[in-house]
Amino acid sequence: MQKNYFLGKLFALLILSAALVLMGTLLGSMGASWNLSETDQTVLFDIRLPRSLGAYLAGALLGLAGGIAQSLFRNPLADPYLLGSASGALLGVGGILCFAYLGNSWLEIIGLNGGAFLGALFGVMASLLLAGGYRSSLRLLLSGVVISVILGAANSLFTFIRPDLFQSIQSFMLGNTTLLNWPGVEIMAIALLICLLISVIISPVLDALSLGENTARTLGLPLDQLRLILIGILALATGCAVAQTGLVAFVGLAAPHLVRKFSGGRQRVQLLFSSLGGGILLLSSDLIARTLFAPIEIPVGVVTAVLGGLYLLILLRRTSLGVRS
Amino acid sequence: MKTCQLTVYRGPCAILSDLNIDIPQGKWTSIIGPNGAGKSSLLQAMAGLLKWDGSITIDKVHLSAFTPKDLAKKIAWLDQGSSNSEEFDDFFSVYDTVMLGRIPHQGWLHLPSDADHISVESALQQTDAWHLRHRPLQQLSGGERQRVLLARMLAVDSDILLMDEPLANLDPPHQSDFLKWQGDLLTQGKTLVTVLHEIHFALRADHLVMLSKGKLHFQGSNQDPRTHQALIELFDGRIRLEKLGDDWVALPK
């Protein structure tokens, strides 16, 4: 019985995703049209389709990262953006951009994606270290903010050193889907596949953590290793998304909450649905960003920041965080 | 199960030292002592959760010789009254919670087999929680939650069951249910170890281990008058024991 429900829900989410991608592809700054000339086709397949798919995949990566972070740290406010991993990833991107001219061969090998991954890993580790663990929501939230500010300052230093990079770093900071292209889509698709596969396989450890750390240990689970793997996936997903679209706030926070009731509690389903939900959220935000003031586009990061910020406020009220921490 | 010269550490400091304890196989052993005597720590050390020196053996096999998975199948551990204070709300169901107890028996994908479903059902029936199976664990009352957690421990189907305050939050009818299925488990040949604050329940156990300030105070059978004497000393003579029917009860003096 439960299985059928699951398939139905999965199907509904996939249909919605497909519909949004289609809409994103057809809807242009000139309005939608069905009569395609040659140039229109080029626009469609080389600009709008990769952009829509890319926005969806980036959202899915962020949604998955948020889902993992919340379940792993048993913390409703854990999110790649709030944990400092996103700003870490941004610093990685900024660093790579800044020093690329040196022509250092290993910088080239690492590339933007690698730099973002390392930065994300560093950001989340630093936040955890500063918060002295992940038990207290408030401490984690605050240290995430502190880390984000410090890493953001480091990033500003990069733009100070290299004023010529100001524009591209700025666009990363705002969150931007206009630069998405096919190679980026491929990288995100591969990363999403890897991350989803691994996290779905080891998700029972997240279920077991609901019984408390000690009980999970007595079930014979290699908790420390699995936790490291999950943090690695978190950083990989965040890094990949940030390297393509820049800082997109709150998708990772909102997606897991929105699907939680819907997914019925098992982490395997929860993570999968968080990911699909994240994709749907970011792509819808992108559509809003493109159409709200058409033909002028606003950066999608602005839209998610406004919507997500409101959502975070509602969440804070509901969980009465100040009392508990 | 035996411990020899056992010293248990929590962080850098030793909280239990020099313990030589015999836990008879196939019997019910109860660990008692005043607050802070180290009862829970002893249980956690036996479950492999704390660092320790000395030796803990099961059937003469050293505890560290087991792989984590084999140890998980051999020993099940129940955490003490984990209250529902987590701010993370999820909708993880009672049935799935009890299924977690089957993790040691499952492969790397953790897909439940028919045997797993059968054992989860019988564990939930045993603790009178089968009717709760579709409810989210987080929405249950303290007593209901405790019964589900007991079922989770039973689902492991291990030979040795370590229970830290298993009666916490249970109402009297479920307390007597608990005693009843303790009896059932003993007839199945399981070894039971409980940490109990209720002295009259502890006195139902076959074997009593008394801890005081991180040391062994006394261990002996429940019918032995010396055990009773030691029990009164353990609580500074502030309790008295009376026989009521077949059972012993402890009353404040």
Image (spheres, coloured by chain):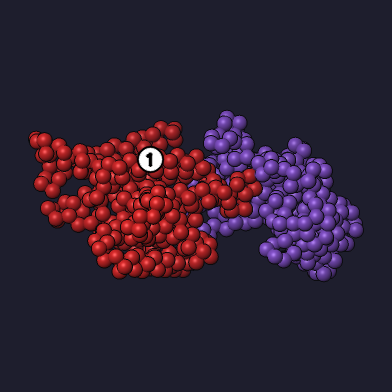
Residue A89 to residue B155: above or below: below
Residue that appears at 65% across and 50% down: B78
Total numbered circles: 1
Residue that appears at 44% across and 51% down: A234
Element class at badge 1: helix
In this picture, residue B141 sits left or right of residue A235 = right
Residue B197 in sight in this render? no
Residue B45 to residue B186: above or below: below
Residue B9 in sight in this render? yes
Residue tagged 1: A190
Q: Give the red chain's letter.
A: A
Q: Tell which subunit mark 1 falls on.
A: A
In this picture, residue A236 sits left or right of residue A132 = left
Measured as percent of width and height from the top left, residue A254 is found at: 35, 54
Q: Which of A322/A50 is in front?
A: A50
Q: Give the purple chain's letter.
A: B
Residue that appears at 43% across and 41% down: A194
Q: Which of B19/A82 is in front?
A: A82
Q: Quadrant of the N terminus of chain A?
A: top left
Other-residue count near label 1 (Cα within 10 Å), few / some / many at <14 / 14–19 / ≥20: some
Measured as percent of width and height from the top left, residue A104 is found at: 39, 55
Q: Amino acid at mark 1?
A: Ile
Residue that appears at 27% across and 41% down: A182
Q: Which of A297/A43 is in front?
A: A43
Measured as percent of width and height from the top left, residue A57 is found at: 32, 44
Q: Residue A219 falls in which quadrant of the image?
A: top right
Measured as percent of width and height from the top left, residue A314 is found at: 34, 61
In this picture, residue A306 sits left or right of residue A256 = left
